């Protein structure tokens, strides 16, 4: 029993914060000092799908943003990662540093400086503007993951495909991509998650017009509407959990990939 | 590009450059202002304290948790899955969870009230929106300890058990194996990831905004406050804070790269 | 660094994993100061046996005795053994010298003595100049030699070697093998050596214990395995033997090679004979040559006997073979085994 105690403590500590979230999401009235809600209600959860609320729209915006950012970041990351991973060149370490830095340096510190330009070029408050600013942390991260994948990539596969009569495009599609698939999935996964969880960059550039789920969640937390906030929070964590389940076998053993969790 | 541009512009603006605004001039006022500003000084102390404490606690809990999971036989997969369950949770959600759990009207307060440990919501200690930042700390540790733990677990995969066997045949008992084999092997990875954790807890905006108080606030929150101030002259100060954050974190990144390189070399 | 010769005895050792018995009632006595090979195909339980002796695994039943005393109550770190694994398993965060000194540090040997002993151990494996190098900066063969020094420096009573050469190139293998054999004889430390390579076992060891399906099928000096295999399984594992059907009736063997007296009970049997024991003669058993292949040191000849059974023999390389030959076989060089 004594030997199991620390394990139980660990498990409880990890799970405890989820409890009020779940209970609040389904409660109608939960006044202090009630340990359980006085009244249950589906109001919070119903609001998630109520077309009159801004939540369904926010879900769409978040999904659209996440997918767009993930796709663009992976496309750019594939080219940059190839250069970084396959070829040795002068100043490679400097480039690596320049890539790692924006992946780690808080977005706020950088974005405050460029907001004026987004305003100037009418990108502020638009979806493309938010995509652009979210690419700031994601492209470097994706490049790093794919760069380390390319570093272990056997170019012989490509040469083999070329000698078997595949053109550059077909070689890329049928050989390069499948070989890099596990890393690409990890990279895309984190790019999506970074975009999905982003708050401050979206707020600064989106200026309140581009309403993603984290922004709405912030607003509901601010309005002290705990039921809706908790229900919305469940909606926000659901896709990441599902994605983890789907991609878990690629995530284990990806040292570079795991770094992404530090940015979430 | 965008990153460098943003940083460069931030630096320029911190020196007084206010594009699209008449009458700006270069100056060092923002930086000297940083030192004079009491709010900023207190914010420095608070931010460093939170970042150090949350990183330290996350390392202790993360390494301890990983070692616990490693030595678990029954229910290992379940415990390991639980351990990693907080990883994909966005910090905004984590912050809300901590708010609902730890605030004076929160779940924990209701529980201690029910069993008679505390009396009423006012009798419960102020954990969220307090001066110390308990809830902020709790959120960071809750999110980042598993992050460190996962890195430790991956560093302790298959090969290390063989090394421990070798150490056993050379006369190393459990404590000696932990000290002379396990700890040295995980140290580089733990150092590298704790730098990431430090960087995050130092520069994140949403968690201290939701769980802290407006004054004293952490540096990113203060920077945003100044940035959105109606007085445009506060902007250079905001930029100066950002530059300080960026320079500090960037030097940590350089340190991380050195460590990560050694880490890779050792585990290869 | 001489260790007193320790007798190692395994009594009724049994070990199962997930319901499969890997070691089944294994009995073995290792003579003090000898190098004994645990030989067997993969999955025969030899590494498991070694780990039980080391204390890294607990047996389900049975006992392990050093000089007649059970060591089961001792944990691995307390047993007077040292082990070299398939991989060098050097600690990557320590220099080569610190790796060798690890066991001494665990035994709280003072630093000055430690340094001296590490130096001597590295000299033994002829790597005295590499103490300050790091793991990964030297070759695989050198790393394995460091692992050997690391095991020997603690002056173990029993040395356990788990296929320590299998990860090395063929050229390095011979070199490290000679080094191990030389050191073992010099130090006189009782050594249990796991291998799946029968040539290696024959070349290196004083005794061989052939493990098949978790049991010792036969043990003794290497030549016994050629001269007198205890069973068909042993004969087949060592390979290269001719097998002929035979019948024993009233104390006499009847086979294609002739008839002679035996002490075996009546019944069907298999007569085995090594190709070297079959010689060409001017008269004797008539046979037809089917194939002759020149192999440098000898000619491998396949012949057919009068009753249609086939036989392999080794002829001198200079011989010119007619299509019909006569053979002579010494009955003492044959082994009669149960079918």
Image: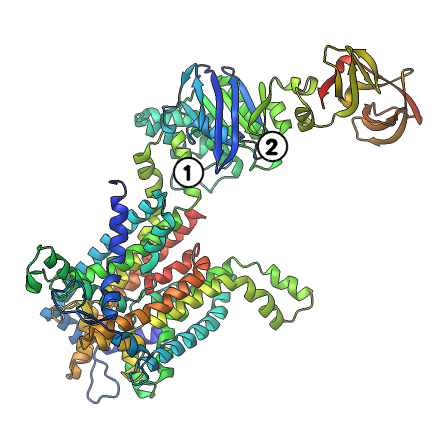
In depth, the one of C250 and B131 nearer the eye is: C250
Mark 2 and mark 1: span between their CA atoms? 25 Å
> Which quarter of the rendering shows the C terminus of chain C?
top right
Chain to which the residue tagged by mark 2 belongs = C
Quadrant of residue A222 within the rendered picture: bottom left
Check the image and report above or below for B181 versus B36. Answer: above
Check the image and report above or below for A92 versus C164. Answer: below
Q: Position of residue B173 (x, y in %)?
A: 33, 32
> Which quarter of the rendering shows the N terminus of chain C?
top left
Query: Mark 2 packing: few (<14 Cα in 10 Å), some, or many (20+)?
Result: some
Q: Where is residue C269 in the image (x, y as percent from the top left)?
A: 75, 21
Which of discs 2 and 1 lies nearer the camera? The answer is 2
**Residue located at (47% from left, 65% from top):** A185
Q: Where is residue C227 in the image (x, y as percent from the top left)?
A: 70, 17
Q: How many labels does the image show?
A: 2
**Residue located at (56% from left, 64% from top):** A178
Give the SS element for disc 2: loop
Are labels 2 and 1 on one chain? no
Q: Residue B163 carries which label?
A: 1
Q: Position of residue B267 (x, y in %)?
A: 43, 47
């Amino acid at each position: 029993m004594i030997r199991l105690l620390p394990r139980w403590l660990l498990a409880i500590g990890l799970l405890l914060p989820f409890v009020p979230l779940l209970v609040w999401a389904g409660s109608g009235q939960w006044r202090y000092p009630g340990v359980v809600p006085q009244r249950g209600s589906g109001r919070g959860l119903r609001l998630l799908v109520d077309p009159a609320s801004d939540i369904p729209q926010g879900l769409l915006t978040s999904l659209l943003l996440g997918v767009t950012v993930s796709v663009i970041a992976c496309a750019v990351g594939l080219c940059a990662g190839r250069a970084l991973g396959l070829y040795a060149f002068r100043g490679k370490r400097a480039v690596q540093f320049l890539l790692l830095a924006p992946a780690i340096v808080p977005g706020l510190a950088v974005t405050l400086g460029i907001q004026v330009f987004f305003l100037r070029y009418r990108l502020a408050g638009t979806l493309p503007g938010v995509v652009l600013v979210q690419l700031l942390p994601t492209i470097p991260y994706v490049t790093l993951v794919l760069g380390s994948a390319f570093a272990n990539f056997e170019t012989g596969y490509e040469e083999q495909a070329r000698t078997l009569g595949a053109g550059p495009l077909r070689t890329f599609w049928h050989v390069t991509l499948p070989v890099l698939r596990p890393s690409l999935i990890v990279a895309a996964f984190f790019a999506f998650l970074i975009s999905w969880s982003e708050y401050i960059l979206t707020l600064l550039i989106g200026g309140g017009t581009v309403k993603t789920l984290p922004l709405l969640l912030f607003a509901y937390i601010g309005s002290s509407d705990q039921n809706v906030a908790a229900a919305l929070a469940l909606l926000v964590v659901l896709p990441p959990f599902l994605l983890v389940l789907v991609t878990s076998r690629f995530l284990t053993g990806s040292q570079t990939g795991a770094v992404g969790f530090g940015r979430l | 590009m965008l990153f460098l541009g943003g940083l460069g512009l931030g630096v320029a603006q911190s020196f007084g450059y206010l594009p699209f605004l008449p009458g700006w001039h270069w100056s060092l006022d923002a930086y000297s202002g940083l030192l004079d500003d009491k709010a900023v000084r207190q914010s420095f102390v608070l931010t460093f304290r939170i970042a150090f404490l949350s990183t330290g606690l996350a390392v202790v809990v993360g390494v301890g948790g990983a070692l616990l999971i490693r030595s678990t036989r029954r229910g290992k997969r379940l415990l390991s899955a639980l351990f990693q369950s907080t990883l994909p949770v966005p910090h905004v959600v984590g912050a809300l969870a901590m708010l609902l759990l730890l605030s004076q009207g929160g779940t924990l307060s209701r529980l201690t009230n029910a069993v008679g440990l505390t009396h009423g919501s006012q009798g419960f200690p102020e954990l969220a929106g307090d001066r110390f930042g308990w809830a902020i700390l709790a959120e960071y540790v809750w999110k980042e300890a598993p992050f460190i733990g996962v890195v430790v677990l991956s560093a302790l995969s298959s090969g290390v058990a063989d090394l421990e066997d070798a150490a056993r045949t050379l006369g190393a008992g459990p404590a000696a194996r932990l000290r002379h084999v396990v700890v040295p092997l995980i140290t580089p990875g733990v150092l590298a990831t704790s730098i990431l954790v430090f960087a995050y807890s130092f520069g994140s905006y949403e968690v201290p905004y939701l769980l802290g108080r407006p004054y004293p606030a952490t540096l990113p929150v203060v920077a945003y406050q100044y940035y959105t101030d109606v007085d445009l002259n506060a902007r250079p100060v905001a930029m100066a804070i950002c530059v300080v954050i960026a320079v500090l974190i960037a030097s940590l990144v350089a340190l991380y790269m050195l460590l990560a390189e050694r880490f890779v070399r050792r585990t290869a | 660094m001489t260790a007193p010769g320790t007798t190692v005895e395994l009594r009724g050792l049994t070990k199962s994993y997930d319901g499969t018995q890997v070691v089944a009632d294994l009995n073995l006595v290792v003579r003090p100061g000898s190098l004994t090979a645990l030989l067997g195909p993969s999955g025969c339980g030899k590494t498991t046996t070694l780990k039980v002796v080391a204390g890294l695994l607990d047996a389900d039943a049975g006992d392990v005795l050093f000089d007649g005393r059970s060591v089961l109550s001792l944990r691995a770190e307390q047993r007077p053994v040292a082990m070299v694994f398939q991989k060098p398993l050097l600690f990557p965060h320590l220099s080569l010298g610190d790796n060798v000194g690890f066991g001494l540090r665990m035994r709280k040997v003072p630093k000055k003595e430690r340094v001296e002993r590490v130096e001597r151990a590295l000299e033994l494996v002829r790597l005295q100049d590499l103490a300050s190098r790091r793991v990964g900066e030297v070759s695989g063969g050198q790393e394995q030699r460091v692992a050997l020094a690391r095991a020997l420096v603690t002056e173990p009573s029993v040395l356990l070697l788990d296929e320590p050469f299998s990860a090395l190139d063929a050229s390095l293998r011979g070199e490290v093998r000679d080094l191990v054999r030389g050191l073992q004889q010099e130090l006189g430390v009782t050594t249990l050596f796991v291998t799946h390579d029968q040539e290696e076992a024959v070349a290196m060891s004083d005794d061989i214990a052939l493990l098949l399906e978790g049991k010792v099928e036969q043990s003794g000096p290497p030549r016994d395995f050629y001269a007198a295999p205890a069973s068909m399984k042993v004969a087949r594992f060592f390979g290269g033997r001719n097998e002929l059907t035979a019948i024993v009736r009233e104390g006499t063997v009847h086979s294609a090679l002739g008839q002679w007296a035996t002490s075996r009970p009546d019944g069907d049997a298999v007569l085995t004979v090594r190709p070297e024991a079959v010689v060409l003669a001017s008269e004797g058993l008539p046979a037809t040559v089917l194939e002759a292949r020149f192999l440098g040191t000898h000619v491998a000849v396949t012949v057919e006997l009068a009753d249609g059974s086939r036989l392999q023999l080794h002829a001198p390389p200079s011989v010119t073979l007619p299509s019909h030959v006569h053979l002579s076989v010494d009955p003492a060089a044959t082994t009669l085994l149960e079918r």
